[in-house]
Image (tube, rainbow, N blue to C red):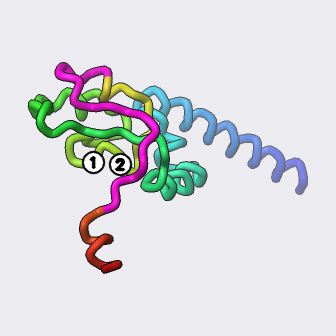
Amino acid sequence: SMRGAIGFLYAWKGLILILTIFLSIVIYRPFCKYICPLGAIYSLFNSVSLFRYTLDHQKCIHCGRCKAVCEMQCDPVKNCNDLECIRCGKCKNACPVDAIACGITKPDVSKETVKAKA
């Protein structure tokens, strides 16, 4: 019956709401990380984004603070423009030696890409 179907849908939506609220307390941005299709689409454009982070390897002391504060589980030392990065700036603020900078820059063209074109 229609009443039974509506009751099931109401209960299902309520369960999803409760689950989302619980996960939001336990995990940082669970919907954005695991469910939202826009996050996956946006991550495809991270590699060509004009707003980028840069890591000064000479300044970096490998203390791990940037990785520890990243809520998206990115490691800025390995890749400061990780596909999962949401550009929140916590890694930059946590760095004790200001090794992470951000701004509008051209994406780095890897040596492999340059060799492939030559």
Left/right of residue 12 with respect to residue 20 in the rendered view: right
Q: Residue furthest right?
A: 2
Q: Decide whether residue 66 is among the magenta residues.
A: no
Between 80 and 36, the residue placed more toward the observer is 80
**Judging from the image, what secondary structure is the residue with disc 1 in?**
loop
Q: How far across and how far down the image is residue 61, in percent?
A: 9, 30
Residue receiving disc 1: 79
Instruction: Work out whether 3 lies above or below 100.
Output: below
Apparent side of residue 93 relative to residue 16 in the rendered image (left or right): left
Q: CA distance from mark 2 to mark 1?
A: 5 Å
The amino acid at mark 2 is: Asp
In magenta segment, residue 103:
yes
Q: Quadrant of the N terminus?
A: bottom right
Looking at the image, residue 92 lies above or below residue 4: above
What amino acid does circle 1 point to? Asn
Disc 2: which residue: 82
Q: State which region is magenta.
A: 93-109
Asked whether the beta carbons under mark 2 and mark 1 sit within 8 Å of each other, the answer is yes
Name the residue at 27% across, 48% down: 79
